[in-house]
Image (cartoon, helix red, strand yellow):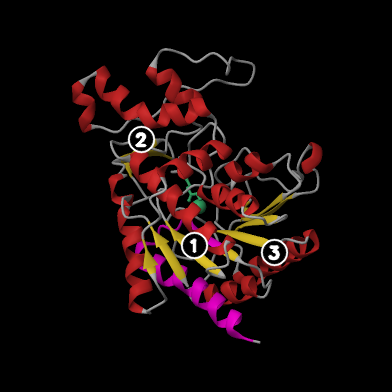
């Protein structure tokens, strides 16, 4: 399978995140991607390429998904942070104050901390010197992968990027995400001629950003299998009764599962999701591929094993759709490469069957 990997991902290196009430070293590290890349090479999974350098095309694609004032903020946030105090160059920027419902979201505050809060939803996503450059290059990976599939050059492709994307909304960051790579890929597939595109999010955490971006649209269906938000991050979205709104009613499917869910039960949800995507008549598929469903994941609660990911890939391939995989979560660093590449290998094996 063709992989488009992010050559600038290491520019985003958070030091600390607020996690369960205290600052801890970031779970989302550059090492994660290195392990996946090493495993792709070890198993000779196919060509590895950097994203296309289409700067104008990328800016246009970003503007299809994210609000201009949000993009402008994230692009310049680090410089603003350091301009406040040169000593800030030695520490990440984290938000600490947020507008609650009923407060003003329309007025852009002058105060930097206030804007950090306006454009985010948690204190777990440090903004660092290289966050924008890394996130932008990551978005380019998703875009390039989608265009390769759209043009028919490749039947499937893998965007291996970090920081991840599925929690990022039109105008907010959070959950380690700044730019929504899966949404960019889905929109690129639409723009490339696919009338119906489905996003299948198999990360442990609900893809709240992706859901919100497409919630009122009937041309992009969003399906997410995840830890029940009653107990699991991101807590405030991802319930089964969220089915879409307006023209998008019926085009969002959430399949929340309790902590402790094993592969048998998880796979039944996968089949339910894939059946819904089939009924929708999808012409192309984006898989938000997080492997934090793994039994050894330090921040999650499902019990999938490494071999199960081969089956996941096979099940996804059985949909027989042009597919773009986009890398999301997975924090059991030693196994993140094996688990991710198992999905791709299972997909390849099944795709080769007549
Ligand atoms: C709390 C946990 C963030 C989860 C990030 C993730 N800071 N999302 O893996 O898919
Ligand atoms: Zn996750």
Q: Residue at x 78, y 58 (%)?
A: 280
Q: Where's residue 317, x and y in %?
A: 62, 73
Q: Residue at x 75, y 42 (%)?
A: 244
Q: Quadrant of the C terminus?
A: bottom right
Q: Give the Cα separation between the discs numbered 1 and 2.
A: 24 Å
Dividing the picture into quadrants, the one containing residue 263 is bottom right
Q: Specify the segment rendered in magenta.
A: 324-353
10 Å crowding of disc 1: few (<14), some (14-19), many (20+): many
Q: Which mark is residue 291?
A: 1
Q: Which mark is residue 269?
A: 3
Who is closer to the viewer here, 292 or 215?
215
Was residue 37 drawn as part of the magenta stretch in this picture? no
Identify whether 149 is placed above or below 168. Answer: below
Q: Which mark is residue 127?
A: 2
Who is closer to the viewer here, 115 or 152?
152
Element on which disc 2 rests: loop
Choose the circle earlier in sequence order: 2 or 3: 2
Q: Are marks 1 and 3 in contact (CB under 8 Å)?
A: no
Element on which disc 3 rests: helix
**Residue 43 in view (yes/no):** yes
Q: Are marks 2 and 3 in contact (CB under 8 Å)?
A: no
Q: Where's residue 125, x and y in %?
A: 41, 38
Q: Give the Cα separation between the discs numbered 1 and 3.
A: 16 Å
Was residue 325 drawn as part of the magenta stretch in this picture? yes
């Amino acid at each position: 399978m063709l992989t488009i990997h992010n050559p600038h991902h290491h520019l985003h290196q958070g030091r600390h995140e607020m996690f369960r009430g205290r600052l801890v070293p970031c779970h989302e590290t550059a090492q994660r991607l290195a392990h996946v890349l090493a495993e792709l090479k070890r198993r000779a999974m196919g060509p590895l390429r950097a994203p296309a350098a289409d700067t104008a095309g990328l800016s246009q694609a970003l503007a299809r998904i994210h609000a201009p004032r949000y993009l402008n903020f994230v692009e310049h946030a680090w410089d603003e942070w350091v301009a406040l105090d040169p000593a800030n160059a030695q520490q990440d920027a984290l938000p600490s104050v947020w507008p609650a419902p009923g407060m003003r979201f329309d007025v852009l505050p002058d105060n930097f901390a206030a804007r950090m809060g306006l454009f985010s939803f948690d204190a777990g996503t440090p903004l660092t010197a290289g966050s924008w450059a890394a996130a932008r290059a990551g978005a380019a990976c998703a875009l390039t992968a989608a265009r390769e599939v759209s043009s028919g050059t490749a039947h499937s492709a893998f965007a291996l990027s970090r920081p991840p994307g599925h929690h990022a909304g039109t105008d907010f960051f959070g959950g380690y995400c700044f730019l929504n790579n899966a949404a960019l890929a889905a929109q690129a597939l639409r723009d490339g001629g696919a009338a119906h595109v489905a996003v299948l999010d198999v990360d442990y955490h609900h893809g709240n950003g992706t859901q919100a971006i497409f919630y009122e649209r009937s041309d992009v269906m969003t399906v997410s299998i995840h830890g029940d938000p009653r107990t699991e991050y991101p807590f405030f979205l991802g319930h089964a009764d969220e089915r879409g709104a307006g023209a998008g009613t019926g085009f969002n499917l959430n399949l929340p599962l309790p902590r402790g869910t094993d592969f048998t039960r998880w796979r039944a949800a996968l089949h339910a999701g894939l059946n819904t995507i089939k009924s929708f008549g999808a012409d192309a598929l984006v898989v938000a591929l997080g492997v934090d469903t793994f039994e050894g994941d330090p921040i999650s609660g499902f019990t999938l094993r490494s071999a199960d990911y081969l089956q996941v890939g096979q099940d996804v391939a059985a949909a027989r759709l042009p597919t773009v995989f986009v890398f999301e979560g997975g924090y059991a660093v030693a196994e993140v490469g094996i688990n991710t590449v198992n999905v791709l290998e299972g997909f390849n094996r099944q795709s080769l069957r007549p």
